[in-house]
Amino acid sequence: MDANTLKTEAARAALEHVEGGMTLGIGTGSTAEAFVRLLSERVAAGLDIVGVPTSERTAALCRELSVPLSSLEQTPELDLTVDGADEVGPELSLIKGGGGALLREKIVAAASRRMIVIADESKVVETLGRFPLPIEVNPFGLRATAIAVERTAGRLGLSGALETRMAGEKPFVTDGGHFIIDASFGRIPAPRALAEALNAIPGVVEHGLFIGLAHAAIIAGKDGVRALDARSRIEEME
């Protein structure tokens, strides 16, 4: 099966956890979009849910497909969030933000009683960091913030290129009006320590390390769909 088919199968399995009456955080990215399309079919058949999108992109797709929406201001506590991930590591540590929505994704995930991650098996890794870590930063003092990130990473034994994400000839701008630095560390053996260190840099708005937020991951592969929880051993999925 190709990657798109695997994403759809993971999304279909996640949809089994959605019940009528739920308030539902809806993620951003290609796998989340597969979930929205399947969710819209259930809504058309009578499923009663209200969704809170994590990006303007997701909101537009939900409106196009007639998925009922609310905002986090109107619905500040959610039953479940379903979202994709760029990497799924040990104890359901994640790298997210490839789609540029990591700040809103993290806010919505933190406001949810449960978070289910959906992905294809290529996203499962033994150690986070193969995918560049997105770091959302304030445009003011961009260079100073990048230097601080580089020095902070160095103290943790990490190195690699830091690149401002671009949209054509201009920096990519998030829904919150921020820039993103993509940090190619290659390997992050202590993601919690890095997360805490990045949080201490004033110019860093948020980062794509999601630690302790996911309750389960639904992974689709050539041998079918499997579920991981925080106690699962990553090698069981490979």
Image (cartoon, rainbow, N blue to C red):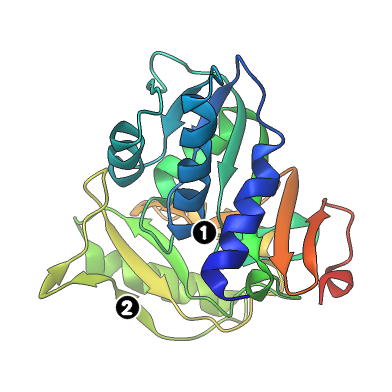
Residue closest to the eye, 28 or 11: 11
- Cα separation, mark 2 vs mark 1, equals 16 Å
* Residue beneath the point at 42% across and 69% down: 149
**Label 1: how many residues lie within 10 Å, few (<14), some (14-19) or many (20+)?**
many
Tag 1 or tag 2, which sits nearer the N-term? 1
Residue at the outermost left position: 169
Above or below: residue 90 compared with residue 2: above
Amino acid type indicated by mark 2? Glu
**In which quadrant of the rendered image does the N terminus lie?**
bottom right
Question: In this rendering, does residue 213 appear at all?
Answer: no
**Label 2: how many residues lie within 10 Å, few (<14), some (14-19) or many (20+)?**
some
Q: Mark 2 points at which residue?
A: 163
What secondary structure is found at the residue carrying circle 1? loop
Q: Mark 1 points at which residue?
A: 96
Above or below: residue 57 compared with residue 122: above
In the image, residue 68 lies at what x, y percent?
Answer: 40, 22
Residue closest to the eye, 12 or 99: 12
In the image, residue 41 lies at what x, y percent?
Answer: 49, 35
In the image, residue 98 lies at what x, y percent?
Answer: 42, 64
Asked which quadrant contains residue 118, the reply is: bottom right
What secondary structure is found at the residue carrying circle 2? strand
Amino acid type indicated by mark 1? Lys
In the image, residue 71 lies at what x, y percent?
Answer: 37, 22
